[in-house]
Amino acid sequence: MRTSWEVTRSVWHAMFMREALARTAGDRFAWFWMLAEPVAFVVIMVLVRELLGRLRLIVGAEWIPWLVLGLVAFFMFREGVLRSLGAIEANRGLFAYRQVKPVDPVLVRNVLEGLLKTLVLLILITGVALLGYDILPFDPLGAMFIWLSIWLLGMGAGLVVSVAGAMVPEVERVVRMMMLPMLLLSGVIIPLQTLPYRVQQYLLYNPVAHGLESLRLSFFEHYQSVQGVDMTYLWFWALAMIALGLALHLRFDMRLKAL
Amino acid sequence: MIEVRNVYKRYHNHHGSDWVLKGIDFSLPRGLSVGLVGRNGAGKSTLLRLIGGMDYPDRGEIVRNCRVSWPIGLAGGFKSSMTGRQNVKFVARIHGDESSIDKIMHSVEDFAEIGKAFDEPVRTYSSGMRSRLAFGLSLAFDFDVYLSDEATAVGDRAFREKAKKAFQDRVSRSSLIMVSHQEGILKDLCQAGIWLNNGKATWFDDINDALTAYRESIGK
């Protein structure tokens, strides 16, 4: 007899190989789009900004490195949520094996997405640095820690919405709809520093904004962020959502399988 | 050895939820193959899913002191976008047989006899090919009890002979719990029978008696 942990480990291994294959070889351009999406987004935003001619200065950071960091970090959070949303439905056929729990594909997808996005970040940093911009982190250890924290935040949110989305189909729609406003409200494109103080105070309720600003602070030595950016706040959200998500999975395990 | 103790099961929906199984109680000795009979909707697949651990009973409990397969059937068990080979690999991995993966692959390929289709996505398979693959896959592992939910229903004569032979070969080691509407294969593979009717189970030591009871209940 294998122990529970051995069974879980072999399920994760099998699932990871499966998801990795589906994600990277699923369609011919899978690899291409992984890099092209953030690059295209950066190019479009830079063009828009040039055309509008409203070059606001970001104190202590260059515009393109600033944008790239925010974008990739936000995409990691977004993919953590959106990939989790579809994880249970996409693997329904495999729940026939009692070893496979609904939480397994969610966790595995998050790990895979974290690895892929880390790779994308490294490639983009190299590319932007080679183009002559100042993007090398001033505090690499801190940057890694914050990157990991943003990943955990995405996973926590993913765990919660994967259960909610499977049981109430409307949740999926709403979450997908919320991702665009989230992009704008997290300070990916619009620097939060340029907004009025009163607005900033509301935007800082969003833990993703804390993550992005902290990441930039760890990259640019003289960067001036908004008042009140705090990683403890992000961790509070991340841990609370992971705990809630795991509890939901535990509680509704059988209902998710049998849906 | 499988024990089913006073099991109740119902599915919740928006318009009332009647009990599908109402106090099922039996124990299955080692090495005895059982056929489950009953009309459509009597709860045969539900009982099989409960025994397989895919779902939990609302009341009562099921004790499995042996290696039980997943319910082998047409629905589920395969990811249709993956090839037969990739599916087999996945299942071998979750059962912790990473080291013998090649052996498993060969035995499934041999049993299924689907040729080049083994490397095509499962979604392109006919139902017969799917059931050949599913059955072959489950036989690659040494389970004590195999659960078959109409897995043989769409198989051709050759497949049926093969399944029969596979079970006769391992009759000392393994047994089968089988849901089927094909009386022939039930008589071939099972000794005892369980007749499910109105949420209750009736045990028959001889599969023929179970089939007779079932036929009488539907007035034939």
Image (cartoon, rainbow, N blue to C red):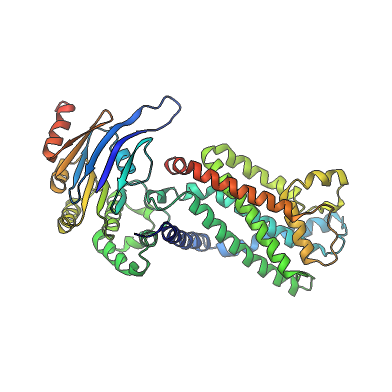
- Placement of B44 over or under B78, stated as above or below: above
The residue nearer to you, when weighing B78 against B29, is B29
- Residue A220 position, x and y percent, is 80, 66
The residue at 63%/53% (across/down) is A154
- Residue B92 position, x and y percent, is 36, 61
Q: Is residue B210 left or right of residue A188?
A: left
The residue at 84%/54% (across/down) is A226
Note whether residue B185 is visible: yes
The residue nearer to you, when weighing B114 against B34, is B34
The residue at 56%/50% (across/down) is A84
- Placement of A217 over or under A86, stated as above or below: below
- Residue B115 position, x and y percent, is 28, 63
Q: What is the count of numbered marks?
A: 0
| Screen quadrant of the C terminus of chain B | top left
- Residue A229 position, x and y percent, is 79, 54
The residue nearer to you, when weighing A62 against A164, is A164
The residue nearer to you, when weighing B205 against B106, is B205
Note whether residue A43 is visible: no
